[in-house]
Image (cartoon, rainbow, N blue to C red):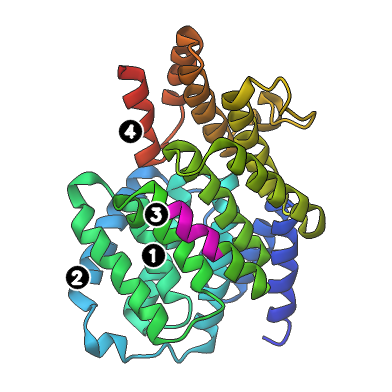
Amino acid sequence: QDKLPAYFLMVQISVAQGHLREAYTTCSSILTQLGETVPETVTPEMVGSMIPETLNMYTEVYDDDWLGKKMEDSTLCNAMKFYSIILTTAHFIKPSHMVAYFICKMVQLSLRHGVCQYTPQALMILSSIVIRFDNAEFIRRIAKNAMLLAERFDLSDEMVDVHLHFHRGAGQLDSYQLCATQLRKSFASGLSSGNANIAFFCAGQGVQFSVISAEKDLISLLQEIDYYRNLLEIYKSELTKYCLLCYRETVSTFIDKGKTTAIEAKLTFADVSDPGNKLLEMFYFHQVFKNYWIGYAERCDHYVQRYGELSQPRHFEAYIIKFYHGL
């Protein structure tokens, strides 16, 4: 138990440096020692039954009595803590249904044993991965309740994470422009509180929303991206670096096809082509988006097809791809 804070810090450093498999293995080992089961893999069918089971549990359990029930078992609290970070690594190196498995485990632990500081984050991520147009109002309610729960427990350290997943899920039902604005605020909050990893995830997701929605003029957006890239020389968040390079090339292409605004560093297919690399989805998305607007219809269609071959792409971005393909 005494070594757990040191292991948690070590995992956070590994994530920041892009050593995701090493971080995942450490988290898996710690969770196993805490009595949790971390399978090598799970089937989509298994997770397909866990999600409605978890949502039904939520409907039955969520009330004032449950909100007043604290998770007292320190072992379970520590398990929730390590589940919260194994999610980040699993998002990039494991299939989407593995991420959903961990989320369901976290939410079910809270519903059975009471709330802890990681419960709002778990509920918010659950809402972001299961949201669909046909269940939007129910999922929005889960997300709003998670936000209220976080505020009730004054979870200043976890609020940036909660806000990130709100805007990656239910927040998108409002507007991408609003999401971009709010994520800039979350970036500043995360950086000032020392949560640099999540702060830069907020920055990257905010830029993505701004690019898609034309929330900001292109020159200003390019300057914002370069500001984040310069900060990364200090904070060394490898994952965000790749994302920002992808977004920057799209913006540079829109400004002048990269004639004067391009830089030597770029995200290439070789950087994201290894099996299971989740950055490949982002790469294909921006190829579709960029080639449509600069008039390369055949190239756009090619990347639409490649995007469609991916396993479980993000729900709302898949709709954007379909929209451009249909124009």
Q: Residues within 10 Å of mark 2 (few under 14, many from 20)?
A: few
Q: Amino acid at mark 4?
A: Tyr
Left or right relative to 197: residue 294: left
Return the mark for residue 124: 1
Residue beneath disc 2: 59
User: In 3D space, how far apart are the residues under numbered discs 2 and 1 (Cα atoms)?
Assistant: 15 Å
Give the x, y percent position of residue 319.
Answer: 33, 33
In space, the residues marked 2 and 4 are separated at their CA atoms by 28 Å
Judged from the image, the secondary structure of the residue bearing numbered disc 1 is helix
Measuring 52% from the left and 68% from the top, which residue is drawn there? 160
Is 4 rendered above or below residue 167?
below
Q: Confirm or deny contact between disc 2 and disc 4 (CB under 8 A).
A: no
Q: Earlier in the sequence, mark 2 or mark 3?
A: 2
Which residue was labeled with disc 4?
319
Q: Quadrant of the C terminus?
A: top left
Q: Secondary structure at mark 3?
A: helix
Of labels 1 and 4, the one closer to you: 4
Task: Answer above or below: position of 203 versus 223.
Answer: below
- Start-end of magenta stretch: 178-186
Disc 4 element: helix
In the rendered structure, find residue 178 and report the number of the disc placed on it. Answer: 3
Does 238 appear above or below 255? Answer: below
